[in-house]
Amino acid sequence: MARRNRRPLGPLDLRTQAILRAVIEEYVTTATPVGSQALVERYRLGVSSATVRSILAELEANGLLTHPHTSAGRLPTDAGYRFYVESIVETVPLPAVEQLMIRHQFGQVEFASEHWFRLAATTLASVTRSAGLATPAKPRDAHIRRVDLVAINERMASLILVLQEGAIKQALVTLEADESVDQPTFNAVAAILNERLSGMTATRAAARLASLREDEPVEALARRVGDRAVKIVREYDAAAIEEVFSDGLLNVMEAPEFAQSDKLRRVFSALENRAYLGQLVGSVAGAGRVQVFIGHENQPLDMRDVSLVLAPYGRPGHAIGVVGVLGPTRMSYSQAIGTVGFVSGLMNELVDHLYA
Amino acid sequence: MARRNRRPLGPLDLRTQAILRAVIEEYVTTATPVGSQALVERYRLGVSSATVRSILAELEANGLLTHPHTSAGRLPTDAGYRFYVESIVETVPLPAVEQLMIRHQFGQVEFASEHWFRLAATTLASVTRSAGLATPAKPRDAHIRRVDLVAINERMASLILVLQEGAIKQALVTLEADESVDQPTFNAVAAILNERLSGMTATRAAARLASLREDEPVEALARRVGDRAVKIVREYDAAAIEEVFSDGLLNVMEAPEFAQSDKLRRVFSALENRAYLGQLVGSVAGAGRVQVFIGHENQPLDMRDVSLVLAPYGRPGHAIGVVGVLGPTRMSYSQAIGTVGFVSGLMNELVDHLYA
DNA sequence: CGTTAGCACTCTCACCCTAAGAGTGCTAAC
DNA sequence: GTTAGCACTCTTAGGGTGAGAGTGCTAACG
């Protein structure tokens, strides 16, 4: 009681931290509010339940724990989890066995970044028993690597755009009513474009197209197709995230806090809220290390029941993606942080190997 | 009572059908069991509730309706819905306004089958307020259209495979430790492959590769890359469905029958059960018209709470995909059938236009 | 002064009971 | 064949109760 207002924000003493930690770890496994008695029984705290009670009261006054009702035990607030993640929990590396298992899985799959980010999500889901999330690596400014035109009929062709960073874009090119072009002409057009646009960003490519002659039919067509390609690259550059692949959503559905399906509904509509995810991904990509977003810290109401543990992967300055885990706020942060850290590190290794 | 066992399977008289229909349509909108009184009040049946009751009892004896408990109203069984779909409901075409709206939406999007199937799912979801499903059109035996090799570094290249039917496949090609190849060589390899493989199915392509000379380095490499391409096409041919795109799952989550989240969980795990979906898609692709799968008719237990309304699209003998709707068994089948029919027809038009 | 035992107190949860309401099935009359 | 009437069944919501859990406070203790 005397203590209660003495340390509103400052660091907590070790015993208090130990008890906060015990409450969180107990709550994470049992999913039910934990009482003072349960704590002294299950954790070697060296004090009686009465003492624990007074410390619990203190933690509650500091806003790190709550009470569903008078006669219930304590459970962590979002601030409690935050304090735990920042100051208490030691980042425990993923067990060697699991590291090996994951490496093995990545070895099994086709060696291409295209597959990796999906596998990352799947792996994260199964190891953490939460939902795994991953986005493909995406550059800030993509470079055109190769342009290809495949005729479909006399007046249509498929434009295939290979980007330096690995992505492939496809679009349909339709000619004017009076034009009629065969595959050799398309090949000539593609050759012109490859010569001029290879290695270019959208803006530089646009500049290079300006020198094409309007009065020469093949060059004129090349210009039109090139403009289209530039537009596609621009759109790709502008998109915040292309795609968020998720796996293991069923794991989250099984958590008891989502027994009422309206909460579940919120989580799902949150996942469809690409805007917020894109924003998160952006901030994580910039930050460099594993980042944790807990419950209400997520601005959208839809997300208040879940936490996200995210980390970037890829090559800074080149292409960057994000992998991570989505789970109930009551999740094992230590495991999640360790696993996400390991997987993002592994992805870095692989990408490095690909471009070395 | 006398009537009860007289017509165990045969056609029902018109009045009985009208009452079955009324029960179903009432139940579809209210989601609560419907009693005899409610029926006479809301539908002009021309008889008293007592008469309705005896007919309801008859329908129940025939297995078309059930009773959750003694003092509750009736609701349709899966067999009831089936009878309704087969014999009672007239296929009502989608209202012209909505047809126009949908056509307009398809006009807005990039003209390419790649985008269409996603849009189909989205459209179906929003019009029927259920979940929309769609698969990309996939051929029975794909034909190689174009092969491309893009160097990543001295010992790796990206193999890009354009299939006649529109799909694009990508894979990484890694050379032996002692090899080192530049882009011009890759171009030569690609040229060889394009010349030999263009227009071929996997089996014919494999045959054509046999004639390449092992002692000539470029041809030997072409052979290895070509083998890889054949393998990829084989895998693509073998895959039952490549991908099922879904949209509007939230609509389904909102249905009152999924208030308990375990039912919801079942539906979601059902959607991850690609095997059954693949089988369904196969049977629908063969059938030609809109097909309905109701509740327990779906073999996997996971699917017993939902119905599927599916239709194929594409070009028979060329590439075929499936579009449709997934909703609670208590869904508006007439609307779903009309909408799915219209959308699949529209997709057919578009695909025809693309290949005409 | 921090720690502890003891205890009164509060609140939830599971249970039972009851009354109201909905809808049926049966019967007898039309 | 249809209908009105009625007894019957079953669900559901509401209120009351006792057990149990866990608290906060107080007074004693080292």
Image (cartoon, coloured by chain):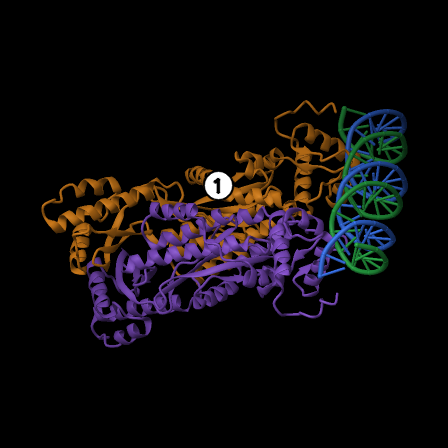
Chain colours: A orange, B purple, C green, D blue
Q: Residue at x 38, y 65 (%)?
A: B236
Residue B213 position, x and y percent, is 22, 75
In-front residue for pair A39/B52: B52
Q: Residue at x 58, y 66 (%)?
A: B299
Q: How many marks?
A: 1
In-front residue for pair B222/A349: B222
**On the picture, is A300 further left or further right than C9?**
left
Secondary structure under the numbered disc 1 in the rendered image: loop
A290 over B138 or under it: above or below: above
In-front residue for pair B286/B8: B8
Does the image show residue A47? no
Does the image show residue B241? yes
Residue A149 position, x and y percent, is 23, 56
Residue A241 position, x and y percent, is 40, 43
Which residue corresponds to mark 1? A273
Residue type at the position of mark 1: Asn
Q: Residue at x 43, y 46 (%)?
A: B98
**On the picture, is A319 further left or further right than A45?**
left
**On the picture, is B306 further left or further right than B165?**
right
B302 over B205 or under it: above or below: above
